[in-house]
Image: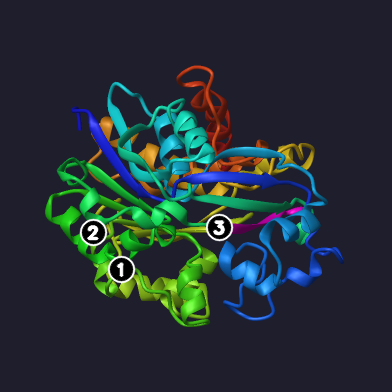
Amino acid sequence: MSKKIIVSGVGCCLVDFLYNNIDFSSETFRPFISKKRGDGGLTPGHLVFIEEFMEFAGSPFETVLTQITGGKAPDKKNIGGPSIVSLIHAAQLTDPESCEIRFYGRGGNDDTGNYLLSSLQKTPVVLHNYQLTENITPSTVVLSDPNFDHGRGERIFINTIGAAWDYQPEDLDEHFFNSDIVVFGGTALVPVIHDHLTELLKKAKSNGCITIVNTVFDFRSEKLKPGQRWPLGESDDSYKYIDLLIMDQEESLRLSGQSTTDAAIRFFMDKQVSALFITNGPNPVLAYSNGQFFEKLALTRLPVSKRIVDELKSNKAGDTTGAGDNFVGGVIASIVNQFQCGVQHPDMIEAGSWGIVSGGFACFYMGGTWFEQKSGEKRTKIKPYYESYQQQING
């Protein structure tokens, strides 16, 4: 493509309140650990809604949070959410002259919402039909234990949906569906959009859009039917309208209803997903393409960046929050950049490489969003890791 590429995204956008160095194995933390699926307790790597967690804990949230954190203030407040964080990162890795990245959403007309709006305006993402309602601003308390899983680190998310309940399918205007690429990110935290994904994906494809879906832990479905397969829209027809599906391993198992990753991949293949990435923390990323959107690629395992892993061993300043979201952003940016170079069917390994180093780089700082001092700064910092990664996978 030589024209300006338009990427439009909708989904989870909120404020993260990040608490680092929370010991998930401590006696203080133990009473709040989940006993069974969907019970509202805390589970490493999972998300829970604040209302269900308060019911599980039997106390007001502020009381419990003070007990868990020792009463300290958040270590950081930042833009969070699988949709907006990935879009911001994609915008930071692409040329604004040749690509415009837009976000559609809602915030609340409160102090948190004003912080979110002012922070969003400091990023290269263009806000479209983004309004502040009288509902509270979506937010997530992120508890991070960098020593969990033998030092690999993990987080727990306590989410408030708030104004995200207000966003409706009809709020997505004709400009959204006339974009080159549309991205539905973490829509399980924007419930009405999530419940209409089949319809929205079908409309996007009928307009010739490339469709990307990146998922998030669906606590609403987990609470409603513990242990059962999570829905994605009105029906499984959603999958055949997806050009690229990006999930972590847990999400792939819950969406497919399978007990193994191999079985999950067969499920998505049978449902006609064109291509997929499955991330799994510090373990290899799985990639597959049937050749319809990306070049055809048999199931492939892409290792994480050895250089980043080595540097993280001596640098514990950051956390893993936003690593998956930045992976998505790196993939989107690579797709855009490949299109701008005239590629008709993007190279999935190339896209995955940018995703992997982007996700790894996010572990060097707290929170998912990096605020640039000047345009191109983040790409300049990440490019050496990309070059090292190419040497790593190509011998």
Q: Which residue is mark 1?
A: 233
Q: Is residue 361 magenta?
A: no
Q: Is residue 390 left or right of residue 169?
A: right
Of the numbered discs 1 and 2, the one sitting upstream in the chain is 2
| Element type at mark 1 | loop
> Label 2 vs label 3: CA separation?
26 Å
Q: Residue at x 55, y 32 (%)?
A: 370
Q: Position of residue 318 (x, y in %)?
A: 70, 39
Q: Position of residue 303 (x, y in %)?
A: 57, 52
Whether tag 1 and tag 2 are in contact, CB under 8 A, the answer is yes
Q: Which residue is mark 3?
A: 159
Q: Residue at x 38, y 62 (%)?
A: 191
| Element type at mark 2 | helix
Which class describes the residues within 10 Å of circle 3: few (<14), some (14-19), or many (20+)?
many
Q: Position of residue 71 (x, y in %)?
A: 80, 49
Of the numbered discs 2 and 3, the one sitting upstream in the chain is 3
> Label 1 vs label 2: CA separation?
9 Å
- Magenta highlight range: 151-158
Which class describes the residues within 10 Å of circle 2: few (<14), some (14-19), or many (20+)?
many
Q: Is residue 130 left or right of residue 31?
A: left
Q: Which residue is mark 2?
A: 201
Q: Amino acid at mark 1?
A: Gly
Seen from this angle, which residue lies furthest left?
206
Taking depth in this image into account, of 389 and 362 the one nearest to the observer is 362
Taking depth in this image into account, of 57 and 349 the one nearest to the observer is 57
